[in-house]
Image (tube, grey):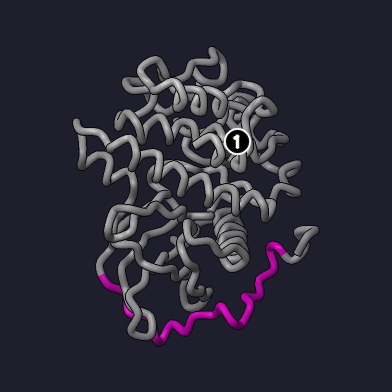
Amino acid sequence: MGSGTGFYSDQLDPKWVVDPQHLFVGPKIGEGSHAKIYEGKYKNKTVAIKIIKKGESPEEIAKRDSRFAREVSMLSRVQHKNLVKFIGACKEPIMVIVTELLLGGTLRKYLVSLRPGRLDTRLAVGFALDIARAMECLHSHGIIHRDLKPENLILTADYKTVKLADFGLAREESLTEMMTAETGTYRWMAPELYSTVTLRQGEKKHYNHKVDAYSFAIVLWELIHNKLPFEGMSNLQAAYAAAFKNVRPSADDLRADLAAIVTSCWREDPNDRPNFTEIIQLL
């Protein structure tokens, strides 16, 4: 695997192939730009079923295929208690990824349901540790997530544990030289990822796993405040302010120890940000 050669191969490892005959698709529980997610059953086990949307143009279809191959490759390689458990996938008759079903819903939904209240600080830090451990595991496998945000974090039924989902944008670190600006959601994204968007379309950009530390800082800030970061700004305004004016959400009313973590993780120079092993120790 190391060199990334088999990365976009069309062959699914037989042990991960799901038999569509045994899939029962139930109610829709989520939708993104690339897929719809349903609750369902696979061989009598309750699961989450992600159905990848069909692309229209040949270009879209090629993009969809490589995304699917990438996500399946990552999910099948990495197992951790804070990563959503991969069950299998199939390409025909439709592209489907099957994972464990977590009944707590997304972290985004949970936080919104508590407003204007906030999470207990200990719970917020516990969630942050879950996320940091998931990220440490990914990075130890040379994988950058690139799309860390509350929509991609799912809670267990007892609302005590967070797991990271959605590897649609994850990349192998060895491949970052070829990366383009097709990336996560601006509000949570490291400035070095999207300052290219204002440049020529398709411009290649080199960056590293420290982009995830930045996103983590924004998520941690949000866990503590239970407010949308860069409130009152559109996604693009937030991106512009962060990238070109070095604007960040205010860390003034954070506890000193938490403020130190947040501000070190969103530093402008990626090299100055801690890695996730350090972040876990700090938390």
The answer to whether any part of residue 179 appears in the image is: yes
Query: In the image, what residue type sits under mark 1?
Result: Val
For the N terminus, the quadrant is bottom right
**Residue drawn at (37%, 32%) of the image:** 222
Which span of residues is magenta-colored?
7-26
Q: Nearer the viewer, residue 122 or 172?
A: 122
- Residue 100 position in % (x across, y down): 40, 68
- Residue 219 position in % (x across, y down): 43, 36
User: Would residue 103 appear left or right of 11 to someone viewing this image?
Assistant: left
| Residue beneath disc 1 | 211
Secondary structure beneath dot 1 equals helix
**Residue drawn at (34%, 46%) of the image:** 107
The answer to whether any part of residue 58 appears in the image is: no
Q: Nearer the viewer, residue 55 or 45?
A: 45
Up/down of 59 relative to 261, above or below:
below
**Residue drawn at (47%, 78%) of the image:** 93
- Residue 216 position in % (x across, y down): 50, 37
**Residue drawn at (33%, 42%) of the image:** 123
